[in-house]
Amino acid sequence: MLERLLFFFHRLGRAGRAWAWRIAGQPAFARRGRENKIFGWRSIRVGKGVTIGDACWIQAIERYGMQTFRPSISIGDGAHLSDAVHISAVSSIEIGHGCLLGSRIYIGDHAHGDTADADHRPLPPARRPLARIEEIRIGDNCWICDGAIILAGTRLAPGCIVAANAVVRLTADAACLIAGNPATIVKRL
């Protein structure tokens, strides 16, 4: 039975598989690479024409240890995610229309393992509560280059460019070039 079902979806082609994903209630991508992991799909909204490369990991985390969350991930129309993009939300992440995300990017609206509380420091990081939870907003037509890290609280205006390997936790009110670790606004566009 399973073989027949898999063969049927294979025969449907790309459009048929996208249709099947919609029926299942999961995000439908215009093009979807191989070996992707998508968790919490009920909290993920994908616009029209969004493509996703290989080995991407998108997770809307509803529960972590004793903590519960109401996550939301929104990816705008025509956005392109290259290979190995990791998006992790416990609060809210919005990626605007027409954004281009390079390879090996991390976007996370939380810190993994609270170190501010002295009671949590003796615990291994994976057992500490998630902390520094703040929404992320990436405006329309932003370009996030390879290896960039977008941290909680980041807000990027439409048209921003984030340089390769930048570590970003800032607010950019107008289109600009952002680079460095920690990232700063290098140039207004």
Image (tube, rainbow, N blue to C red):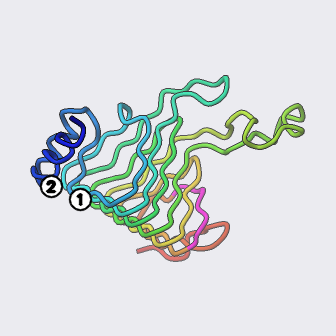
What distance separates the C-alpha of mark 2 from that of mark 1?
Answer: 8 Å
Residue 168 belongs to the span the image colors magenta: yes
Q: Is residue 129 left or right of residue 159?
A: right
| Quadrant for the C terminus in the image | bottom left
Residue count near mark 1 (Cα–Cα under 10 Å), binned few <14, some 14–19, many ≥20: some
Tell me the kind of residue under disc 2.
Arg
* Residue named by callout 1: 31
Pointers 2 and 1 in contact (C-beta within 8 Å): yes
Query: Residue 113: image x %, image y %?
Result: 73, 41
Q: Nearer the viewer, residue 185 or 53?
A: 53
Tell me the kind of residue under disc 1: Arg
Instruction: Give the percent coordinates (x, y) of residue 27.
Output: 28, 42
User: Horizontal placement of 71 versus 152: left or right?
Assistant: left
Identified at 35% across, 31% down, the residue is 42
Q: Which residue is mark 2?
A: 14
Specify whether residue 126 is painted magenta. Answer: no
Q: Measured along the vertical axis of the image, is residue 8 above or below residue 100?
A: above
Numbered disc 1: secondary structure: strand
